[in-house]
Amino acid sequence: MAAKKSGLTFDALLKELKAQTFAPIYFLQGDEPYYIDLLSNYFEQKILDETEKAFNLTVLYGRDIDHLAVIDQARRFPMMSRYQVVVIREAQYMRDLTQLEKYVENPAPETILVICYKHKKLDKRTKFAKQLLSSGVFFESKRIYANQVPGWITSYLKKKKLTIATKEASLIAEYLGSDLAKISNELDKMILNIERESITQEDIEKYIGISKDYNIFELQSALATRNASKAYRIIRYFIRDPKNHPMVLIVSGLFNYFSKIYLLHGLKNASDREVMQTLRLSSPYFVQEYRLAQRKYSRQKTESVIRLLRDYDLRSKGVGNDHFSHEALLQEMIYRILTL
């Protein structure tokens, strides 16, 4: 069995599992379910061979069990196998989870107990948590920040022996958000159709459905350069496809963009590196665009844009808006930004 550990990264923990260095208990918690699911699937699929699984793999659900049922299962001896694996999915719904404390104090050495505690965090100050930290492996799956998603995409593709430019990775991140399971599914579907080593904008448009010419980044660029004709073309494209380009996401994207321009006004004489860190940009590629937008929009005008965006966000939700459609609001909003 493995040494007792906490604070392991996903890669480090997976490396231990592949080396068949096991602990008696694994507590997988956090608000990012992606890594918890990957680890849970590994325990269920890779620890035991197909013959061993029939007798020695048990999957339980937190809503349906109590601590006595878990202990009864965990104390069984494996049949024709060195280990048995017991996985508790959705353990956050198990009402008497902390009553497993006695088992955790003295776990069965032939059992690998995996507790999946999603979307929540166990208070590490409790006696139960301290015992878990002492007896097994405590893994926390943390959500990554939005500005870290492009880097995550790049890293994910690199493991698949594929490359992608920063702009394209950022485009995918902006379109898909920070749901890692959703992103990995879309990337995997794209990978199946690509035979070369580099991901292009054409690949993204064809297999994920993100237009290389009509997206939030291109709209931001058009506004940054005050290119009215380009901005209106993009808005008309968005209006024709409201399902994939809802007003709430457009306003949110622009609000984040102009909020960063506002921050940039306060970074006098800052280096590109300092700008990247403060604005949480994923690459130096974007720094120059933000500097250009800063020159086009004074601090006062940037404040006005932010107030406008807040106003249109409320109007899109029905506050102070009696008859304007989202399409009309979008066009009016872009006009007012460009004419400030």
Image (cartoon, helix red, strand yellow):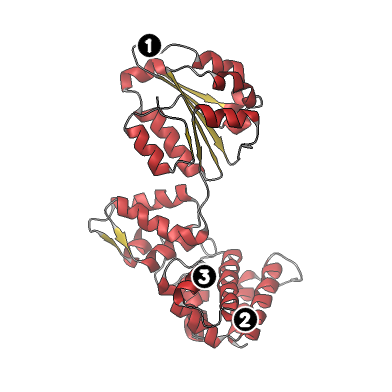
Residue 161 in percent (x, y) is at 26, 53
Residue where numbered disc 3 is placed: 238
Disc 1 marks a residue whose amino acid type is: Met
Q: Residues within 10 Å of mark 2 (few under 14, many from 20)?
A: many
Residue 233 visible to an observer of this rendering: no
Which residue shows up at 55% across the image and 16% down it?
Answer: 71
Q: Residues within 10 Å of mark 3 (few under 14, many from 20)?
A: many
**In the image, is residue 267 above or below residue 115?**
below
**In the image, is residue 334 above or below residue 60?**
below
**In the image, is residue 236 above or below residue 151?**
below
**In the image, is residue 62 above or below residue 243?**
above
Left-right relation of 325 to 108: right
Residue 76 in percent (x, y) is at 47, 12
Residue where numbered disc 1 is placed: 79
Residue 110 in percent (x, y) is at 42, 17
Which residue shows up at 64% across the image and 37% down it?
Answer: 123
- Distance between mark 1 and mark 2 Cα atoms: 69 Å
Q: Residues within 10 Å of mark 1 (few under 14, many from 20)?
A: few
Q: Quadrant of the C terminus?
A: bottom right
Q: Determine contact: label 3, label 1, CB under 8 Å.
A: no
Q: Secondary structure at mark 2?
A: helix
Q: Earlier in the sequence, mark 3 or mark 1?
A: 1
Residue 106 in percent (x, y) is at 53, 18
Query: Nearest the camera: 260 or 109?
Result: 109
- Distance between mark 3 and mark 1 Cα atoms: 60 Å
- Distance between mark 3 and mark 2 Cα atoms: 24 Å
Disc 2 marks a residue whose amino acid type is: Thr
Q: Earlier in the sequence, mark 3 or mark 2?
A: 3
Residue where numbered disc 2 is placed: 302
Dot in front, 3 or 1? 1
